[in-house]
Image (tube, coloured by chain):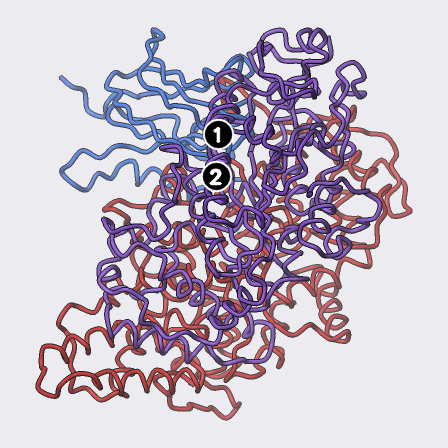
Chain colours: A purple, B red, C blue
């Protein structure tokens, strides 16, 4: 029996910005956006279609027009540390698996072709057989055993490493933000999009404009108690004021942010619902699972990707309890079901819109879980997790070695079989088509894995 | 220039309202028009003395705020800790003390601890804000919130936790000039602090000699049976410490990086004073670099400075909890810095999202009693300049650039162009909307983000 | 550090100005509508801290923040172990408010019911002091 104490991991309270930021994004405050706080009267009275396009908008459209088929990379984060062993079940070593998972063994997991692996039944539901259906259709590449050497089992540390692509506790821009710093546009904030109220740390950039947009209607700038022509005039004055290009980093940042804030609202205004009961211009062409927040956001994202907005990279966080210290059977089933069904609907949506060939989704979590279950019907933080790439052009199959259940590491954790930075470097080169070294330090040392076909 | 172009009040020393506004924004949370007038008249020396040393009278002016009809309950109500400190920033008659408390909250960052511990730490930081750095460092090293945050509590001789020792050198005192070995040895010297629980309640932290590593340690080339205070004495005596700390203080107040000679001069003031903070801050606030380009502010206001300053300027108190989520959306929740390294200041505050939040802030401001423009209150016969003057007066005469001033004037003078001359109701409506728009743009525009 | 009255268990840690703010908030009930008293509660692995551990009988709002890394919950039990109120799951970094009216003076127990969290230290007490004026 391995020592339990060494692995509970949750005694570590030091946190990175992501978690701290979330403190104030809990339900009691996020629902109190200005629009919902009784200040938004007059907003829906007047649509924004008549607003003149600024130079910025033309730049954004030009970017989209210049590369209408530019590939889009979507990052879907499963917060909490998704368990590998019960998500993708090692049917080919079932005896050892059953020894490790004394309390929460998953019986009868449907087999994934001839891979020797099974898949959690919750991932077989949804459009066209869910994730399992997509796997069989050649649209899912699985990455079991993903992590980094000497894994840090704090959520916040590990998450920070994945977000930045750097093994450091120092603050740093996110890896997709850094990619935009090198290869993005200097004036289209929609190129890097977090479908959320605040920017994902993955998307934080050093200078490239990026945006967090939960829904297009909430992005528009408006002035309390103004509407119609009066509001138009005021926002035109905003444009004139913010068109200045003052010198010095502080003024440049303030004026640049003023231009971008307006730009994001203007660009998305035509796609906002004109009022609460009006039609949603972004309504998906395929059904999404009901009451599924990830699905709702992915549906909006599919629509935004299909429009000429120049979206290049996007982040969405999944909902659900992946940090399954206890009650894992129920919690993991629920979390995987909602995630899988949302992803399956998203893929069908992209195909229906005819843009599936240019969208690839990376699904990841900050770490895996202990191979041996605990006494609370759960699993504690461990190494060697699970990630996957999903898309019409994903290299399908099992793309990394499934960690051995008999050769565990010194801490009795799964061996890491693929470094997440190998996946990042491969995505940057194979999918985004640029050098990985710009974004991932020492990219050459991580090797590559074929993720795209 | 301000929207309401103020008369240049120049005393013989060349001390103007613009100087006062610059000093009050950088050392505090802005100057009201009355303060700018008063202190421009009294001159440079008197103003600096008041800012640095404080004046007579109570620290907080005016009545304590109520939110939803009740006094603030900082320990127990969500967000009231933020409001409680924000209120001090708005009402303080010692704004530099609050500003320096903010500096220390960022420099000695602690987060995610129980609210009463964070509030107690805040008082520790305020008490030591302008005093001896060594004294402050000793208090913070013993502070329960800090100890729990950086795992100094319960670091014992069997397994010294290096977290605090590392941040002490890297972030709090030196930045560079030490080795991994120094960190590990200092971690040993810092062992012995233990958290205590009784009756299921946290009872604080106590030093237990039996948990302390009493052996000989070697730090910065010196050997001894060092304990906590010896480590703190060693780090503040390290040659890197004074330049490190005075540079950080300088950057808090002045946008241009300090010259090498300036750092040397400040470090010498700091050392000669026995590592006191106030003389260094006084020297920085007196430095000509602080007053450069008075007509073109170039530092980005931190979110709390924007909010506290906006409330002060317009004569508002903290009477709604909306500031809490607004500050969060702008990227600065007090008592919750993103990491032990604190917030990223300067241009990093600005992004399309944070700008959007600052725009929303202006909307909430327009809803406050002092700034609200009632329906149908517009006067279309008011000249453009008078409309702008009225808006500027209500918002505390914020600075706007020449170009922004011209854009606002053109907005005010062109607003009725599409209306018939006999459309009285339409013109009155438009005048109401114009007054709201002008106030909003004065609070939300890019110039308002700078000080 | 100032030793203070009125906030006893964690009192040694709290500066005097804050305690003044607390007591004035507790005493004030300006409107005719009976206002509930807020009680801040912090949870983490493996402790529960109650920021106002002594209250008067009446309606309470327990404002719970999970400052830990695991999912927790909070349950209020009376002296006989009867469940007076409970939160649902509170995720890491999330918050929950529990409304409960405790009219009977005495000591109530707060605990996290997930797994062995209570045994590992996630329990606390909330004392309802007798009303200021005797009922009879």
Circle 2 marks a residue in which chain? A
Q: Is residue B27 in sight in this rendering? A: no
Q: Position of residue A426 (x, y in %)?
A: 73, 45
Q: Is residue B30 left or right of residue A137?
A: left
Find numbered disc 1 in the image and state the secondary structure of the residue it sits on: helix
The residue depicted at 57 percent of the width and 10 percent of the height is A108
Above or below, B115 against B438 in this view is above
Find numbered disc 2 in the image and state the secondary structure of the residue it sits on: helix
| Same chain shared by disc 2 and disc 1 | yes
Q: Is residue A203 in sight in this rendering? A: yes
The residue depicted at 22 percent of the width and 58 percent of the height is A41
Between B369 and A138, the one nearer to me in the picture: A138
Gap between marks 2 and 1 measured at Cα: 8 Å
Circle 1 residue: A128
Classify residue A44 by image quadrant.
bottom left
- Quarter of the rendering occupied by the N terminus of chain B: bottom left
Between C22 and C84, the one nearer to me in the picture: C84
Circle 1 marks a residue in which chain? A
Crowding near pointer 2: few (<14 within 10 Å), some, many (20+)?
many
Q: Hey, which residue is sitting farthest bottom in the picture?
A: B12
The residue depicted at 25 percent of the width and 50 percent of the height is A276
Q: Position of residue B37 (x, y in %)?
A: 38, 82
Q: Position of residue B316 (x, y in %)?
A: 30, 63
The numbered mark, 2 or 1, whose residue comes first in the sequence reads 1
Circle 2 residue: A348
Q: Position of residue A205 (x, y in %)?
A: 61, 57
Q: Marks 1 and 2: in contact by CB < 8 Å? A: yes
């Amino acid at each position: 029996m391995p020592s339990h104490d060494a692995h509970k991991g949750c005694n570590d309270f030091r946190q990175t910005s992501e978690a701290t930021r979330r403190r104030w994004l809990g339900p009691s405050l996020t629902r109190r956006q200005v629009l919902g706080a009784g200040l938004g009267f007059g907003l829906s009275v007047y649509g924004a279609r008549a607003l003149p396009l600024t130079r910025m908008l033309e730049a954004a459209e030009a970017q989209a027009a210049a590369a209408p088929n530019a590939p889009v990379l979507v990052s879907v984060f499963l917060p909490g540390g998704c368990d590998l062993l019960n998500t993708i079940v090692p049917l080919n070593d079932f005896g050892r698996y059953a020894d490790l998972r004394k309390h929460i063994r998953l019986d009868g997991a449907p087999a994934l072709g001839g891979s020797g692996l099974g898949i959690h039944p919750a991932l077989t539901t949804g459009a066209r057989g869910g994730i399992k259906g997509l796997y069989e259709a050649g649209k899912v590449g699985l990455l079991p055993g993903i992590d980094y050497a000497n894994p840090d089992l704090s959520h916040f540390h590990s998450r920070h490493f994945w977000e930045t692509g750097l093994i450091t506790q120092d603050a740093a821009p996110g890896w997709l933000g850094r990619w935009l710093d090198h290869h993005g546009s200097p004036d289209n904030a929609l190129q890097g999009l977090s479908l959320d109220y605040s920017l994902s740390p993955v998307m934080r950039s050093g200078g490239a404009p990026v945006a967090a947009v939960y829904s297009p209607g909430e992005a528009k700038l408006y002035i309390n108690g103004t509407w119609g022509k009066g509001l138009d005039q005021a926002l035109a004055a905003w444009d004139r004021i913010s068109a200045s290009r003052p010198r010095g980093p502080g003024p440049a940042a303030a004026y640049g942010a003023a231009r971008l804030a307006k730009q994001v609202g203007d660009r998305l205004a035509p796609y906002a619902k004109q009022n609460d009961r009006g039609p949603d211009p972004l309504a998906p062409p395929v059904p999404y699972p009901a009451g599924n927040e990830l699905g709702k956001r992915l549906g909006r994202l599919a629509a935004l990707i299909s429009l000429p907005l120049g979206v290049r990279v996007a982040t969405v966080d999944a909902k659900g309890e992946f940090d399954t210290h206890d009650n894992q059977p129920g919690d993991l089933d629920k979390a995987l079901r909602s995630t899988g069904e949302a992803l399956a609907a998203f893929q069908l949506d992209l195909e229906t819109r005819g843009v599936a060939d240019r969208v690839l989704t990376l699904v990841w979590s900050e770490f895996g879980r202990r191979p041996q279950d605990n006494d609370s019907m759960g699993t504690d933080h461990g190494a060697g997790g699970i990630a996957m790439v999903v898309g019409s052009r994903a290299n399908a199959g099992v793309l990394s070695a499934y960690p051995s259940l008999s050769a565990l590491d010194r801490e009795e954790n799964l061996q890491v079989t693929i470094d997440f930075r190998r996946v990042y470097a491969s995505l940057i080169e194979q999918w985004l088509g640029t050098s990985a070294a710009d974004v991932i330090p020492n990219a050459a040392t991580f090797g590559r894995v074929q993720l795209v076909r | 220039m301000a929207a309401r172009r103020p008369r240049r009040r120049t005393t013989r020393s060349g001390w103007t309202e613009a100087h006062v506004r610059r000093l009050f924004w950088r050392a505090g949370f802005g100057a009201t028009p009355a303060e700018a007038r008063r202190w421009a008249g009294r001159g440079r020396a008197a103003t600096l003395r008041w800012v640095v040393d404080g004046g007579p009278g109570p620290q907080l002016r005016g009545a304590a705020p109520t939110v939803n009809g009740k006094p603030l309950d900082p320990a127990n109500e969500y967000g009231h800790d933020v409001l409680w400190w924000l209120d001090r920033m708005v009402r303080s008659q010692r704004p530099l003390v609050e500003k320096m408390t903010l500096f220390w909250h960022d420099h000695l960052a602690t987060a995610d601890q129980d609210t009463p511990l964070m509030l107690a730490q805040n008082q520790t930081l305020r008490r030591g804000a302008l005093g001896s750095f060594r004294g402050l460092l000793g208090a913070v090293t013993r502070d329960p919130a800090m100890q729990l945050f950086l795992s100094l509590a319960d670091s014992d001789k069997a397994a010294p936790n290096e977290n605090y020792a590392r941040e002490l050198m890297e972030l709090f005192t030196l930045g560079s000039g030490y080795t991994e070995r120094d960190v590990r040895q200092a971690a040993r010297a810092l062992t012995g602090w233990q958290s205590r629980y009784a009756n299921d309640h946290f009872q604080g932290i106590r030093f237990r000699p039996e948990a302390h590593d009493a052996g000989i340690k070697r730090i910065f080339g010196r050997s001894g049976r060092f304990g906590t205070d010896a480590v703190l004495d060693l780090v503040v005596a390290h040659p890197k410490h004074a330049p490190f700390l005075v540079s950080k203080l300088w950057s808090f107040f002045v946008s241009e990086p300090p010259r090498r000679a300036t750092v040397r001069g400040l470090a010498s003031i700091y050392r000669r004073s026995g590592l006191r903070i106030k003389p260094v801050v006084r020297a920085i606030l007196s430095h000509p670099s602080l007053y450069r380009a008075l007509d073109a502010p170039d530092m980005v206001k931190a979110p709390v400075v924007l909010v506290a300053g906006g409330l002060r300027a317009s004569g508002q108190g903290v009477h709604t909890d909306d500031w809490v989520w607004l500050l969060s959306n702008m990227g600065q929740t007090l008592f919750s810095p993103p990491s032990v390294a604190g917030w990223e200041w300067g241009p990093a505050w600005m992004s399309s999202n944070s700008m959007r939040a600052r725009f929303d802030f202006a909307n909430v401001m327009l809803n406050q009693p002092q700034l609200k423009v009632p329906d149908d209150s517009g006067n279309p016969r008011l000249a453009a300049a008078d409309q702008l003057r009225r808006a500027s007066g209500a918002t505390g005469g914020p600075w706007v650039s020449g170009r922004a001033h011209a854009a606002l004037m053109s907005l005010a003078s062109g607003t009725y162009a599409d209306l018939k001359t006999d459309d009285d109701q339409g013109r009155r409506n438009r005048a109401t909307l114009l007054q709201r728009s002008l106030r909003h743009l004065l609070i939300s525009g890019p110039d308002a983000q700078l000080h | 550090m100032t030793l203070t009255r009125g906030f006893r268990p964690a009192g040694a840690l709290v500066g005097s100005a804050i305690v003044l703010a607390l007591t004035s908030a507790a005493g004030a009930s300006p409107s005719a509508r009976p206002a509930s008293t807020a009680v801040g509660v912090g949870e983490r692995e493996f402790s529960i801290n109650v920021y106002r551990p002594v209250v008067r009988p009446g309606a309470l709002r327990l404002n719970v923040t999970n400052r830990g890394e695991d999912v927790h919950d909070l349950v209020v039990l009376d002296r006989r172990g009867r469940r007076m109120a409970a939160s649902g799951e509170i995720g890491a970094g999330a918050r929950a408010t529990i409304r409960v009216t405790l009219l009977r003076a005495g000591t109530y127990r707060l605990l996290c019911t997930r797994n062995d969290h209570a045994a590992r230290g996630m329990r606390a007490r909330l004392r309802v002091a007798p009303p200021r004026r005797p009922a009879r």
